[in-house]
Amino acid sequence: APEETKASVAAAYYGDTGYCAPGVESVSRTAVDNDAPQRPPDAVESFVYHGHAGRDKLPSEAALPGFASALGRYWGELEALTRALMSLSAAALGLEEDHFEAAYARHASVLRLAHYPPAAAAVSARGEGEAAAGRLRYGEHTDYIGFTILFQDDSPRPGLEVRMPGGEFVDVPPLPSTAADGADGGGGVSFTVNVADMIARWTNDRWPSPLHRVANGAPGAERGRLSVVFFSGPSNDTLVECLPGCGEPKYAPVVCGEYLRAKLEASNG
């Protein structure tokens, strides 16, 4: 989008609705893992949508025709997918399938459209050090609330890496979308689904929230990266505590909205 369009919907801070320029967010500041290094600000621009009619900052229809309606449709589809995921999760945990319905009735989910510039541009945006050499586009962190539903573009090496129990980071490439099938001739879209901190706390780390990051591609790669991220999560007033059957609690109960606010404040520095 043109710079004037971005400026017209600029967010006051990262996490607010609207456009966030590169270098505003520094997600590695939110990591509680002592082994996670502190990185320079992240070289990513993003647009955040909260699904609130009349309150989200959206470009005019003249500036970006069809953008607002496309966001609304995608949001609705991901809401339905989240309900299915939470129902399946409850069943897998030995709970009634509607166990999470009340928590998600007024869910505080967030849709984020992210553009990571090509490697050369990322270097110029980040200053000195390892990140400036093109190693990382987005620092090490865990996600904050419920399941993260990620659509990645088809880059040969899109850059998402997750830390394994032994400490090594491994690539998480997107699965290929399915070919057209079915009566309507439509194919399927693949998503990467990630456990975030509230799920880990509910399950007492039975389902852990992994540390992950976004790296640049191979040396010399100049291609940018696009991702569409739906951070699903319960309502802000939900008290998250260890579920029955998940053992002796490792974590104190926490209110989802308070936890999220603390993470966003850390990310904004």
Image (cartoon, rainbow, N blue to C red):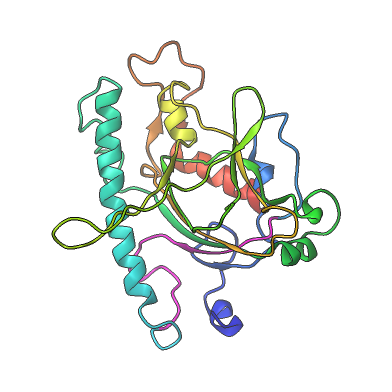
Residue 209 is inside the magenta segment: no
For this orientation, the residue located farthest to the bottom is: 62
Q: Quadrant of the N terminus?
A: bottom right
Residue 119, placed above or below residue 136: below
Q: Quadrant of residue 67?
A: bottom left
- 107, 95: nearer the viewer: 95
Residue nearer the viewer, 222 or 104: 222
Percent across and percent down for residue 55 are 39, 68
Residue found 34% across the figure and 70% down from its top? 70
Residue at x 24%, y 30% (from the top left corner): 99
The x, y position of residue 97, in whole percent, is 20, 30
Q: Is residue 12 left or right of residue 182?
A: right
Quick check: 185 left or right of 250?
left
Dominant secondary structure, magenta: loop
**187 lies above or below 140:** below
Q: Is residue 63 above or below residue 17?
A: below
Give the percent coordinates (x, y) of residue 94.
Answer: 26, 19
Image point (30%, 54%), residue name: 188
On whether residue 55 falls in the magenta region, the answer is yes
Residue 157 appears left or right of 66: right
Q: Residue at x 72, y 55 (%)?
A: 41
- Which residue ends up furthest to the top in the rendered image? 248
Query: Which residue lies most toward the right here?
Result: 128
Residue 235 image point, x, y percent = 36, 44
**Count of all numbered marks drawn on residues in the image:** 0
Q: Which residues are magenta?
A: 42-60
Q: Is residue 249 left or right of residue 12?
A: left
